[in-house]
Amino acid sequence: MDCPFCKIVIENTERIIRETERTFTVLSKPRLMPGHLLVIPKKHVERFSELSKEERNELFDEIALLEQKILIGLAPGCDISQHYRPFIPNSRFKVSHLHIHVRPRSLDDDLYQKVQIFERDVFQEPNQEEFEKFKKLFGN
Ligand SMILES: [Zn+2]
């Protein structure tokens, strides 16, 4: 398999800065800001739904712990995100093995100042049609 994250697990490289039974954490390379982490299940899956409940719990426990460490010692904010985008080819910027980004955030970081400051222009109020459509799709 030609998966860079599986390769990290097999080679047990120095890139691993934290490890649990089912997860490992590395500094993102490339990164968006210093301290940008990737929390990765050792099992090669592409989506959360492919993990067992125990595997997801361990993954989320790690994420919560790292968020706490960031907020205590590194930055006033923290972003946690995961992206499933099979429509984008694999590259240096996109790996299909599930990974969760944990990013220290502050108002003066480059990501906010150069990119996310423009998100305000994208936000819109959802209309009634959308509400009904998505309630039907996601509701119980
Ligand atoms: Zn993999």
Image (cartoon, rainbow, N blue to C red):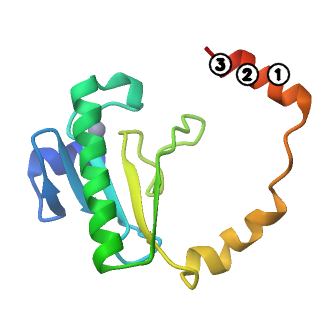
Whether pointer 1 and pointer 3 mark residues with C-beta atoms closer than 8 Å, the reply is no
**Secondary structure type for disc 1:** helix
Whether pointer 3 and pointer 2 mark residues with C-beta atoms closer than 8 Å, the reply is yes
Q: Is residue 1 visible?
A: no
Measured as percent of width and height from the top left, residue 89 is found at 53, 42
Measured as percent of width and height from the top left, residue 61 is found at 25, 46
**Secondary structure type for disc 2:** helix
Q: Locate residue 137 relative to residue 5 in the image: left or right.
A: right
**Secondary structure type for disc 3:** loop
Q: Residue at x 41, y 46 (%)?
A: 95
Measured as percent of width and height from the top left, residue 8 is found at 19, 51
Q: Is residue 36 above or below residue 60?
A: below
Residue where numbered disc 1 is placed: 132
Q: Residue at x 90, y 26 (%)?
A: 129
Q: Which mark is residue 139?
A: 3
Residue where numbered disc 2 is placed: 135
